[in-house]
């Protein structure tokens, strides 16, 4: 019998909005200080340099601006937990939009100007629309509140990409990291429903997943535990399961505690 779909987790609107704004501000401060040499550095994202990565992070918020500015769609086409898998079909479009935005930034005064405009327009978009309003996204119609939660994932993951590429230490907003962790953990539980494995990502998330004998009380026989950033890297394919295990960045106990077949859950 198929597993029943779990009720979607609820996210606090004020905290989500504040988290997205704060994380973008952290990145903005770092990007404004990048040298031409740092902007030319490679990243772990294919052919993107730090310059394209920085432009893409601005695009993460500009997608909200565009969505709010467009006419409200007639129907909701995607729910929050469908979003991670839905991203796989849009890699080409994202790459094209990112490169176009990077070129536009060069012509319009550079990344500093791009980030200033993006912050201002994003604040205006948030003031103009409630969370319940359906907005246009590349994935289809989606409530603004849900789409903002997806922005915590994008910003958290790409802040980590930026730190890795440019040798930075851009901080992670606690609420953004928490929401990112929970979305990706819930996405795993949706992709691999069941109760035989417990994934723990303290202090933000615990989920049951993977079909098999269900745990009901006491210490679960199959447990995976890791930290939030390692989980984000695993869930987005930036760190292979075997590598994280070999480097003791995660602990896995029990015969079924191998999540590699279900990773990544995003992209």
Image (tube, rainbow, N blue to C red):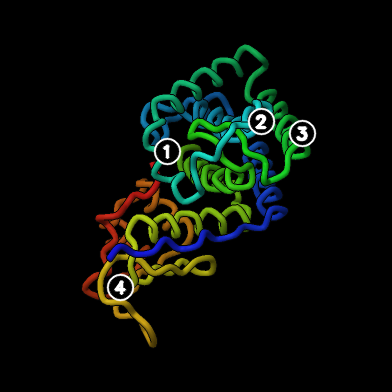
The answer to the question of whether label 1 and label 3 lie on touching residues, with beta carbons closer than 8 A, is no
Q: Work out whether residue 192 or residue 122 is closer to the camera in this orientation and state it.
A: 192
Quick check: 160 above or below 207?
Answer: above
Q: Secondary structure at mark 2?
A: helix
Residue under label 2? 65
For the residues labelled 1 and 3, the Cα–Cα distance comes to 26 Å
Real-space CA distance between mark 2 and mark 3, rounded to the nearest whole angstrom: 8 Å
| Sequence order check, earlier mark of 2 and 3 | 2
From the image, tell me which residue sits under label 4: 196
Which residue appears at 35% of the width and 69% of the height?
Answer: 224
How packed is label 2: few (under 14 Cα within 10 Å), some, or many (20 or more)? many
Q: Disc 3 and disc 4: Cα gap in Å?
A: 46 Å
- Most extreme residue toward the top is 107
Count of all numbered marks drawn on residues in the image: 4
Q: Classify residue 203 by image quadrant.
A: bottom right
Please tell me whether mark 1 sits on a helix, a strand or a loop. Answer: helix
Q: Which residue does the numbered mark 1 point to in the structure image? A: 87
Task: State the CA–CA distance, disc 4 to disc 1.
Answer: 27 Å
Q: Marks 3 and 2: in contact by CB < 8 Å?
A: yes
The image shows residue 45 at horizontal and vertical percentages of 40, 34
In the rendered image of this protein, does residue 220 appear above or below residue 40? below
Mark 3, residue position:
124
Give the side of residue 103 with respect to residue 109, left or right.
Answer: left
């Amino acid at each position: 019998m198929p597993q029943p779909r779990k009720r979607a987790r609820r996210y606090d609107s004020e905290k989500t909005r504040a988290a997205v704004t704060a994380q973008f501000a952290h990145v903005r401060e770092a990007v404004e200080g990048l040298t031409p040499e740092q902007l030319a550095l490679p990243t772990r994202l294919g052919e993107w340099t730090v310059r394209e990565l920085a432009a893409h992070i601005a695009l993460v918020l500009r997608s909200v601006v565009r969505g709010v500015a467009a006419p409200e769609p007639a129907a909701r086409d995607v729910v929050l937990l469908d979003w991670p898998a839905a991203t796989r079909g849009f890699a080409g479009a994202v790459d094209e939009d990112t490169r176009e935005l990077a070129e536009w930034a060069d012509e319009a005064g550079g990344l500093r100007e791009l980030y200033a405009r993006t912050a201002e327009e994003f604040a205006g978009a948030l003031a103009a629309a409630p969370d319940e309003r359906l907005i246009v996204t590349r994935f289809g119609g989606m409530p603004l509140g849900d789409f903002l939660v997806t922005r915590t994932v994008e910003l958290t993951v790409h802040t980590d990409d930026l730190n890795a590429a440019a040798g930075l230490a851009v901080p992670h907003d606690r609420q953004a990291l928490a929401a990112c962790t929970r979305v990706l953990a819930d996405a795993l539980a949706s992709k691999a429903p069941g109760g035989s494995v417990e994934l723990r990502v303290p202090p933000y998330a615990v989920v049951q997943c993977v079909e098999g004998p269900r745990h009901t009380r006491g210490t679960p026989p199959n447990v995976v535990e890791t930290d939030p950033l390692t989980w984000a890297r695993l869930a987005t394919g930036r760190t292979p399961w075997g590598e994280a295990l070999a480097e003791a960045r995660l602990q896995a106990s029990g015969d079924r505690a191998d999540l590699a077949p279900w990773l990544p859950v995003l992209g």
